[in-house]
Amino acid sequence: MKVYLITIFSFLVLNATAQKKVPNKQVPVKVERIVEITEDVAISTDSLITESKIDFKEEAQPTKNFDTTLVPEDNFTKEIDKLLIEIEAVNNATIIGISYIENELKKDNSLAMNGFYKKFKTALASEEVKKYYRNLFVRIYRKYYTEEEVIQLTSFYKTELGKKTFKNMAIISSEAMIDATKFGEYIGRRIYAESNK
């Protein structure tokens, strides 16, 4: 059975939609320009997720080929937890995954896939998944930041500028990727044309 599984870019998840969600309102994926978000909107998950086509073979239990170690429960982790709450990182990762599943259900609502995706959606909302996301983010922040930097980040994201920065980050990243892709294609075509003179 072929299904689509989710691979969430950690950078985009960490910087994804901290704004409050407005039901049934999404920014289109193929936008030319967005200068500034002036109201709370939900970002389309299409720009935040890549698909991996997987063939499931008969196996009793899948192997865990990802980090499941416990994170230290020290003061540093407590500070990271405060930041994760401020930017709603775990909640947003869960919302992105569930939104993706809901979109897949619209594309393929066959009986077999409907049952699979509904179970997948339930699993994504589980405490097991939330705990995994939390530990994942804790590991990443511990790797790239000091405790003092995490405290400063949390303070910054509580300010109006911090909220605006976080709110616009996914849009800025998405817009930059659109133009960077076009620029890369242009450079490639130019080099190809010059090579064939």
Image (tube, helix red, strand yellow):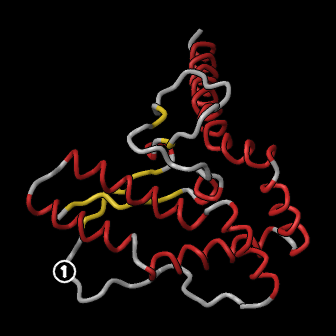
Left or right position of 16 against 21: right
Residue lying furthest right in this view?
A: 148
Task: Say which residue appears at 79% left-offset and 49% top-offset.
Answer: 162
Q: Is residue 51 above or below residue 112?
A: above
Q: Quadrant of residue 196?
A: top right
- Check disc 1 and report its element: helix, strand or loop: loop
Residue at 29 percent across and 88 percent down: it is 61
Query: Observer-nearest residue: 150 or 19?
Result: 19
Q: Tell me: 191 left or right of 164.
A: left
Foreground pick, 145 / 36: 36
The image quadrant of residue 81 is bottom right
Q: Is residue 93 above or below residue 170?
A: below
Location of the N terminus by quadrant is: bottom left
Q: In this view, does 47 lie above or below 158?
A: above
The one nearer the camera, 176 or 58, is 176
Image x and y of residue 145, in percent: 83, 69
Q: Where is residue 8 in the image (x, y as percent from the top left)?
A: 50, 58
Residue at image point 27% right, 51% down: 104
Residue 130 position, x and y percent, is 50, 75
Where does label 1 land, which residue?
A: 58
Seen as rendered, the residue at the extreme left is: 111
Image-quadrant location for residue 86: bottom right
Give the residue furthest to the top.
Answer: 197
Quarter of the rendering occupied by the C terminus: top right
Residue type at mark 1? Glu
Q: For this view, does 80 lie left or right of residue 13?
A: right
Figure label count: 1
Relative to 110, 142 lies left or right: right
